[in-house]
Amino acid sequence: MNATTPSRDDKKALLDPHGLASITLTANWVDDQASHEEQLHVEKFSVWREADMLPFEIAQNIVGMRSTDQAQAKVGAGEIIDSWSSAQQFSTKPASFDRHHRRGLEVEPRIGRFYPQGFFKGVQGIYSEAIEPARIIELTSERMKIDLNRPMAGYPLEIKFYLDEILPGYDQRGGRCTSPLDELLQFPGLAAPLKDGQETDYGDDANGLSRMDERSDDSFYANPRMVQHLDSRALQTVNGLYKRLIPSQSEVLDLMASFDSHLQGTDYSTLHLLGMNAKELSSNQAASSSVVQDLNDSSTLPYENNSLDAIISTASIEYLTQPTEILAEALRILRPGGLTVLSFSNRWFPTKAIRVWSELHMFERVGMVTQWMQRAGYTRLHTFSSRGWPRPADDPHAGQTPFSDPVFAVWGFKP
């Protein structure tokens, strides 16, 4: 047999023009505040129906791929998302904002926030049923300016297509098509800052940073919770991110820690813990030291200046009532060039999370946490999202949703 000719088995492993595959799409983009990486896993991708919706440089290379092959394309602003246009910005009166558009709920207009277009009354071309996002980009007592451009409009992108697995079966059906690329890019732009450098008012003021249950955290966390708060697939993503980001032989602090720091396979030298429950911390066999401390009661971290290489916090940032102050403290104890990584998802204890957390879209939370890190003095800010993975079959919530918990992360470095 000719060495360049695929064997019979190899031919079966090539992606067919009518084939099905499990894939992961990634989009990288940069705004004035941070670099972003968005991942969307598609468990069943149809080459026949969906390949043509991808950038041409990717679509033309899909047929004939093998598992773990990848393709990528650089896409200019306006090529796959409508071009940004100043004609999509309108000025109106603040009274045009319908605070009671959602029955039973009073919504406050805030600079930089996104709202369904139906919130804006009397603007030509907007209907009350419209749900596409519109952003308030100027707001005074006399004037409100709104931007109807798509959140990702104006940003160049790098798109990557990774073939996880070729699936059995074929698809030759016509009819309605879905666009995984549209799903990937629909919401990440909600994390982008205002283009004039002004901060977004996410509502993270004193009221927004309060909680439904303002009783002491000591009683809430008195009993140990020896359970994972995210599903195993999401934790695999978190673990992979930490392995990727934390340098070899780092001295690491797990902030708001528990019995598992999700650092399996990470080449760290020392792990310190700071959390709320002594039994949980003592069960973390990877750690060399631990401190029990309520950061909402005392925000000073008990570590020396410039003493640590990396700080992680998993599924916990939403419980801090003084997030910027704590992040500034974390910056103080990092060595120059050290990093803080904050990962979170869409599961939390609602009575103990800050009020604003539940009021924001998931990508607006990414934007708010990024803004907190910028306020605290971090540089080289990055964000990450991963969505669409199937929920593990043995997960307690497997019957409620087909998808694994999404993972979001924000990290930055000490100058």
Image: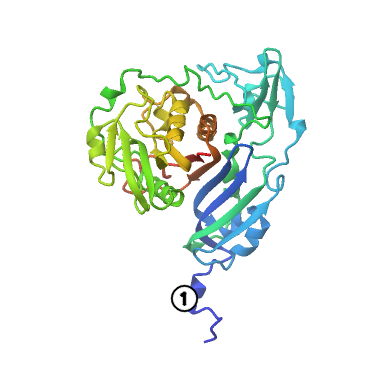
106 left or right, relative to 306: right
Q: Position of residue 163 (x, y in %)?
A: 52, 60
* Mark 1 closeness class: few <14, some 14–19, many ≥20 residues within 10 Å: few
Which amino acid is tagged 1?
Asp
Colour mapping: rainbow
Q: Position of residue 318 (x, y in %)?
A: 42, 30
The residue pinned by badge 1 equals 9
Question: Residue, x 61% and y 45% (percent of image)?
Answer: 29
92 left or right, relative to 200: right
**Position above or below: 261 against 19:** above
From where the camera sits, is residue 407 visible? no
In front of the other: 20 or 332: 332
Question: Residue, x 51% and y 17% (percent of image)?
Answer: 105
**Position above or below: 299 against 282:** above
Farthest residue to the right: give it. 87
In front of the other: 315 or 413: 413
Q: Secondary structure at mark 1?
A: helix
Q: Quadrant of residue 136?
A: top right
From where the camera sits, is residue 165 visible? yes
Q: Quadrant of residue 49?
A: bottom right
Question: Residue, x 60% and y 28% (percent of image)?
Answer: 114
135 left or right, relative to 356: right
Q: Position of residue 57 (x, y in %)?
A: 66, 59
Across the whole image, how many numbered discs are drawn on residues?
Answer: 1
Q: Position of residue 334 (x, y in %)?
A: 44, 38
Q: Quadrant of residue 255?
A: top left
In front of the other: 343 or 168: 343
